[in-house]
Image (spheres, coloured by chain):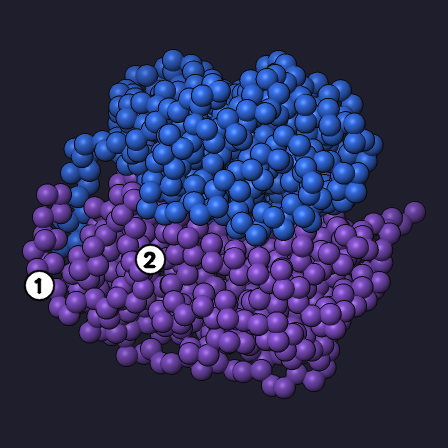
Chain colours: A purple, B blue
Amino acid sequence: MRLAPLALVAALSLAPAARAADNVSTFTLDNGMEAVVIEDHRAPVVVHMVWYRVGSADEPPGRSGIAHFLEHLMFKATDELVSGELSNTVAANGGSDNAFTSFDYTAYFQRIAADRLDLVMGMEASRMDGLALVEEDIVTERDVVIEERAQRTDSDPGALFNEQLNAALYLNHPYNRPIIGWKHEAHTLSLEDAEAFYAAHYGPNNAILVVAGDVDPAEVQALAEKHYGPIPPNPAIVPRNRPSEPPQLAERRLSYKDARIGNDYVTRTYLAPERDPGNQRSAAALTMLAAVLGGSSTNSVLARKLQFENPVSVYTSAWYRGGSLDDGAFGLVIVPAPGVELEEAERLLDGAVAEFIEEGVDPKQLARIKMNLRADQIYARDNISSLANRYGRALAVGLSVEDVTAWPDLLQAVTEEDILAAAKTYLDRTSAVTGLARADREVTQ
Amino acid sequence: MIRVLLTLALGLTLAAPARAAVEIQEVTSPGGITAWLVEERAIPFTALEIRFSGGGSLDREGKRGAVNLMTATIEEGAGDLDAQGFAAARDGLAASFRFNANRDAISVSSRFLSENRDEAVALLRSALTEPRFDQSAIDRVRAQVLSNIRSDEGDLNALAARNFRALAFENHPYGSSIDGTLASVAELTRDDIVTAFGDTIARDRVFVGVAGDISAEELGPLLDDLLGGLPATGAPLPDPAEVQLTGGVSIVDQDTPQSVAMFGHEGIDRHDPEFFPAFLANEIFGGSGRQSRLSYEVRETRGLTYGIGAYLATYDLANLVIGQVASSNDRMAEAIEVTRAEWAKIADAGVTEAELAEAKTYLTGSYPLRFGSNAGIARILVGMQQDDLSTDYVNTRNNKVNAVTLEEIRAVVKRLYRPEALRFVVVGRPEGLENVN
């Protein structure tokens, strides 16, 4: 009733959508735009997302932050919408909207009543090729972005140090620049920079549509044909081919002092392979290595050795970042107990990992981790926004829906040998950065 | 073309009937424990939310931080299981229990699979009824709490909140952090932790919300099994807190490029007859769902911040209208000036017809969207009970929103926004601002 044209359009829909897994189906428009539909009929809600395969690592030199700045500007006027109209219309319909930028992607989304999908898709399509920026937008919004950087990064010593560590981890790859941009470059970003970046990277052939919620895949496809279908592919879009890392031969060590640091800590970050299309086994082993070393604050290897058996730390963790287009990273962190020096904490951390490689994986711990990963398949269905994110992020970094659906089984198949081999291969200090962060509170008399 | 469609859809939105969000059942166990339930069979797990009123405000004199440390240690060993044994049992079931304390309550957020529900509930029961509080566990968790307190000492948001709280609620538990101080936490003994447990975890103050793969018939016995063994009563709940804020500016010096300001004054009670007009007025003024006046003036028009908002804080023992903004040291004075002017403007002139209509369509349209996940629904069910609402509220709430008139808003804004009483606590080195008392 409400959106009468919908049924008509649906009747004209083309090839039936392909089904990849329970409740997940896909289709591709003629202009190259890919789409994933995830059904969840519990509540009359839909999450509508458009992901662009462009992020901060695709920025031209000297223009760091332009991908994120453009994300802000995408809420301004288009050929059909006045500045702010998209968000205002979403809110007037009870929905919420936002966007985010990462190294490899920029995504825009709305969460709204399911019968308003037509409405939000129309507006999202309008800014895919019709952004109409004016100079006044630039000046005010650039101030907003500078304040955002001040709030998220400059006011947070941990975030500032992470920027430096990341810059040291990647010698040549543009992942070495912060997503929000270096402060001195943020001040220089212009209308021309934003327009050039938009023209080079936005268009249906560089976009992924993800729709999750109380929807029918055939109707979603019909709406996508209606709103995104008429937009021609952008001929400027070319495959991403970024500068890559040379062999890393020299261990790097960074020392940082900041009076605002509450607890001194040590980080170690290794370059590590990412999930690759059709080839995710190393990434699966690294994911399980992170879970075994640091996934639990009580029973993981680092907690057991450095908080329980020998209580020299108040916090330890291990993490793996594998959902990127290019090289990922594996990290360890230790916050020593008061009285334990950072150099000693680092030595104890390395000692714990070395012992683990000698001793092997506790089979009971591995079984518990796998049980929780199986359960996550159930719990994940409770949150359609995070499911939508999972598919959107994967497709935006070049993985396929099949790679996403294969991932849980790959994790279950990881063996003790795989985990230990990953540890021996990738925890190599010549391709790592060690960071020592200290409060510098010495008072001059 | 697109514009025409938009207008059409908007027009229809206003006419759309309110759709019932969920069906809530009130379940009373054979032993007399009440819970609210939304049965949702689509996914084979259950989300169960428990809250014990009182929370961190029940710390005894000189024992600041005891309830928080106790809450963080509940899961560190129970019955025959030490901390690692308990965690292994929980992880083996793929269940999750999260314990958290705030100024008004201790909350237990749990989820468990249908396939091993009984085992999961038995494990949670042992944490709630026979926690061990081993000295080694207390000391380990204490070290973590102390490290959090040290981190907060350099955190602008934490510093702003701490100083604002101290001004607002001197000599009341609300006036300080429930984490306690480095000194108070260092001195807490195992006896203090056991006392805090007895003071806070009791049946006379419990609220339960459940959403997921479970029926009312199954839930009744589960409630008795889980909570029947708790003591009947805990410590008396604390007295209401008097809001002691006065108008002015308090600067907390901190060497940082950007300042953070927290601002506000006394607010309005959830049960006040004028609450709904106040709620709509504040949605227009400082809400986060749609472009608020504050956001439009401070962020959109002037670029002074990444985000600003204001909300009605309806705590159990006091009410505030409170907001926050971060702005560079050389721009904070202007952000405050604009905020103050907006505060006076809404008090003086109320809101417009168009603003009220937009706020209504946003609030009524977004309400059903809140009920999108089992975990979220379980939390909402507990919140509704704490607010003393009926199960039918989900069906009547949008009517209350729609019934608010421009005149009712004009009446309430005079008492809700009082520019002369507005206190700003600013952490940083803001230029052109001075302490004003």
Number of dots carrying numbers: 2
Please, which residue is most extreme toward the right here?
A445
Please tell me the numbered disc located at residue A12: 1
Q: Residue at x 23, y 33 (%)?
A: B19
| Residue B105, quarter of the rendered image | top right
Quarter placement of the C terminus of chain B: top right
Query: In this rendering, would B266 be left or right of A84?
Result: right
A210 to the left or right of B65: left
Locate residue A346: give its quadrant: bottom right
Marking on residue A235: none
Give the percent coordinates (x, y) of residue A41: 27, 47
Relative side of B255 to A239, left or right:
right
> Compared with residue B318, is residue A79 higher up or lower down, i.e. above or below?
below
Q: Are marks 2 and 1 in contact (CB under 8 Å)?
A: no
Amino acid type of disc 2? Met
Which residue lies at the image location 71% right of the left edge and 44% below the top edge?
A: B82
Q: Quadrant of the N terminus of chain B?
A: bottom left
The three-letter code of the residue at mark 1 reads Leu
- Residue for badge 2: A49
Q: Nearer the viewer, residue A207 or A317?
A: A317
Camera sees residue B156: yes
> Residue A309 in the image: x percent, y percent?
79, 55
Q: CA distance from mark 2 to mark 1?
A: 24 Å
- The chain carrying label 2 is A
| Residue nearest the viewer, comparing B19 with B220 | B220
Find numbered disc 1 in the image and state the secondary structure of the residue it sits on: loop
| 2 and 1 marks on the same chain | yes
